[in-house]
Amino acid sequence: MSTAKLFWNTTWRGGAWGLLAGTMLGTAYGAVFANVLLLSGLFAQMPTAFESSDALRVGVVIPFLALIGAIMGALFGVPTGFVVGALNGLLIGMITRAFFFPPRDARTYRRVIATTSALFTGIASWLGFFAIMLFYANRDKANVPILAVGVLIPALIAGVAAAFISREIARWYAESFS
């Protein structure tokens, strides 16, 4: 396999898997996060004022917020997932070419790729989510430390997803030499 073919295949696979994972995980996280904020805000502001008659209104609001959160999650997850996924795929290709070409120890290869992918994607996603948040935030009144912490959870989710996705890329690489 040529170096160009290796880089192309790892990069497009990383971008495609990153786009898919970013879309799905961003949508799910946004939907859940919006409702967690709603319910925690409701109970924090008036824990004793919540009555059973409010349940119907909350029941209507929860799906609406889930939809809005899902759309916002996708707006963050799609571009970040694609760009970071493609860069991660390119990084996997470089590591593979430099240290594991031709494939020798599949177990070590999978561990190195999974660890590298998780670290790179977690950090790059954090930077991407943070940049998107600052883009949409009012820069004069934005609480930058809170924004930085707020994007930590989705970045960690992206890192864990990248570790699993890298196994698919590693499987393709191992099978291409079989």
Image (cartoon, helix red, strand yellow):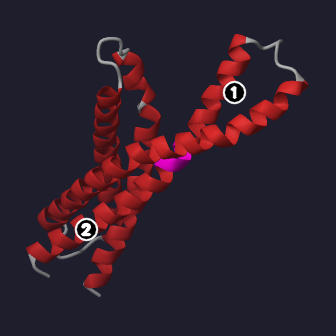
Give the secondary structure at mark 2: helix
Question: Which residue corresponds to mark 2?
Answer: 12
Provide residue 178's location: percent of width, then percent of height: 29, 88
Q: Residue furthest right?
A: 52
28 horizontally vs 130: left or right? right
Q: Is residue 29 magenta?
A: yes
Q: Is residue 26 left or right of residue 32?
A: left
Residue 113, percent across and down?
Answer: 30, 58
Q: Nearer the viewer, residue 175 or 142?
A: 142
Q: Amino acid at mark 2?
A: Trp
Q: Is residue 161 above or below residue 9?
A: above
Residue drawn at point x = 32 percent, y = 82 percent: 175
Q: How many marks?
A: 2
Q: Nearer the viewer, mark 2 or mark 1?
A: 1
Seen in the picture, residue 52 relative to 87 is either above or below; the reply is: above
Please give the name of the residue rendered at 28% of the width and 35% of the height, measured from the top-left corner.
127
